Image: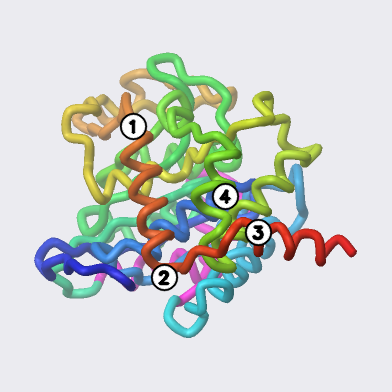
Amino acid sequence: MNYNYQVPEHKKLRLIINTDAKNEADDQFAIVHALLTPKFDIKGIIAAHFGERKSDRSMEDSYDEIEKLLGLMDLQSEVNVVKGAPKAMPGEETSVMSDGAQLIIDEAMKDDSKPLYVIFLGPITDLACAYLQEPKIADKLTAIWIGGGVYPEGDREFNLSNDISAANVILKSAIPLWQVPKNVYRMVKVGIAELEHRIRPHGEIGNYLFEQLAEYNHSPYWRNPWGDSWCLGDSPAVSLLIDDHPFHYEEKDAPLVTEDMCYVSGASNSSRKIRVYNYIDSRFTLEDMFAKIALNYPEKSKTLLNKEVVNSEN
């Protein structure tokens, strides 16, 4: 990494990334941001499913997308990528074991002085399965989950909808959980023009990040109401581990989630608390990502980029 500073060893943390990378266009930015953050000792990336509405092989699609990103960053041999559960848990009592769940267990049970965090950019299936298989992991990691509806009532939310049973398993558990619900992760808004200006010129990975988002802007599966902007809603999982926004969360009683994704207050163990964020500093999140991509990948001129587009169309 091309930085003129170092993160002291005692300030580093272990990180596992769990991502439904091919669901839409924002996971890719969060993955790249995490891989370029020197504070993180990346222990692996787990490909997550994202239901069956768009694909009957969604976890495999996520796996392929992760491999593509690593190839563009020339990191294929440096990062362990494994497959998570192919679909949601059949119920709260049934673990669906996978290489992803096993990675979480194995890393959590290691004797390592660096704390372990697992970020979930989609459903929280693989953590729930790992916990059911090995409950001892509960006090050996912290989970950060991008998902869930607006408090206090709750409502429909995509990541939650893809495995409500898994969410309830974790809400009932003792695993430390930082939740970023949808009204908060949607604070990370960016103009598509800004992404073209600040991301696209920086290497093959920068060009791909922009192009895949611009292409997805036309997708029939994603009814983006804005057209000229995007929500990079998965990125808070990365920036909260760089700065945990200590004045912008509440410790809440862990709810349970009904089938229609409403929160039922007090239904779980009354002593169980989770951290629920009410604000994300979007500029801090975006600027840190922009800087890390710019420092690590040389900028191409806009003239050269435009020539490449013309040549690809001919």
The CA span between labels 3 and 2 is 37 Å
Residue at (27% x, 50% y) in the render: 241
Which of discs 3 and 2 lies nearer the camera? The answer is: 3
- Which residue is situated farthest in the right direction here? 314
Q: Position of residue 57 (x, y in %)?
A: 73, 59
Q: Toward the viewer: 234 or 114?
A: 234
Q: Is residue 93 above or below residue 301?
A: above
What kind of residue is marked 2? Gly
Q: Which of marks 3 and 2 is nearer the N terminus?
A: 2
Quote the CA–CA distance across marks 1 and 4.
30 Å
Query: Which amino acid lies under the numbered mark 3 shown in the image of this protein?
Result: Thr
For the residue labelled by badge 3, is the local secondary structure a helix, a strand or a loop?
helix
Disc number lying in front (1 or 3): 3
Residue, disc 2: 44
Q: Name the residue under label 1.
A: 280
**Local crowd at mark 1 within 10 Å, few (<14), some, or many (≥20)?**
many
